[in-house]
Amino acid sequence: MAENLHDFYIVTTPVEYDDGIAAYTVGQIPAKTLVLEQRMIIVTAFSGTSPTVDLGDEDDDDCFVGSEDSTSTTVGSYLGDGSPSDTYQGAWFPAKKNIVMTLGGSDLTAGKAVGVLHCLDLSDSV
């Protein structure tokens, strides 16, 4: 029987409109971690031409919360809906992996987003 299991949260470094349009490493998932739930929080609404924000990992930049699951122009908390583009809902990470947020659009003049991952540490169990 597994003992000493504990859950924890990873809150990513925020991305802001003035960081520029690009993919940014905003955190890291430790090895032997199960990601139970992921959210993207739009702290400040993005404005500009067609702003988008994706939350994913270094292999798939929208595997947690894609821009189709959120409204970057509206402050709020957005959950990946488990659709095929959000393939990592309930994902197992046997090795550490970088968390990535990607800003899209152009001429951004405002906006700030952060990712939150609810995780389970299985390092003592597997």
Image: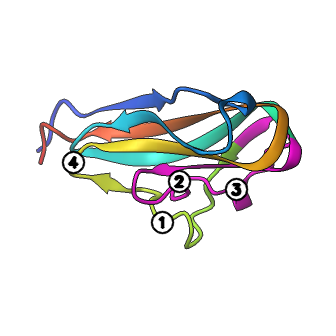
x 57%, y 36%: residue? 115
Q: Is residue 61 left or right of residue 1?
A: right
**On residue 23, which mark appears?**
none
Three-letter code for the amino acid on which mark 2 is drawn:
Phe
Marks 4 and 3 close (CB-CB < 8 Å) = no
Three-letter code for the amino acid on which mark 1 is drawn:
Thr
Query: Magenta span has 54?
Result: yes
In the rendered image, which residue does mark 2 sit on?
64
Inter-mark Cα distance, 3 to 1:
14 Å
Secondary structure found at label 3: helix
Magenta residue span: 48-77
Three-letter code for the amino acid on which mark 4 is drawn:
Ala
Secondary structure found at label 1: loop
Q: Residues within 10 Å of mark 1 (few under 14, many from 20)?
A: some
In the rendered image, which residue does mark 4 sit on?
95
Q: Quadrant of residue 20?
A: top right
Q: Quadrant of residue 1?
A: top left
Between discs 1 and 4, the one toward the N terminus: 1
In the rendered image, which residue does mark 1 sit on?
87
Inter-mark Cα distance, 2 to 1:
7 Å
In the rendered image, which residue does mark 3 sit on?
67
Inter-mark Cα distance, 2 to 3:
10 Å
Three-letter code for the amino acid on which mark 3 is drawn:
Ser
- Name the one closer to the observer, 51 or 22: 22
Marks 2 and 1 close (CB-CB < 8 Å) = no
Q: Is residue 23 left or right of residue 112?
A: left
Q: Residue 100, how many percent across, how many down?
A: 49, 44
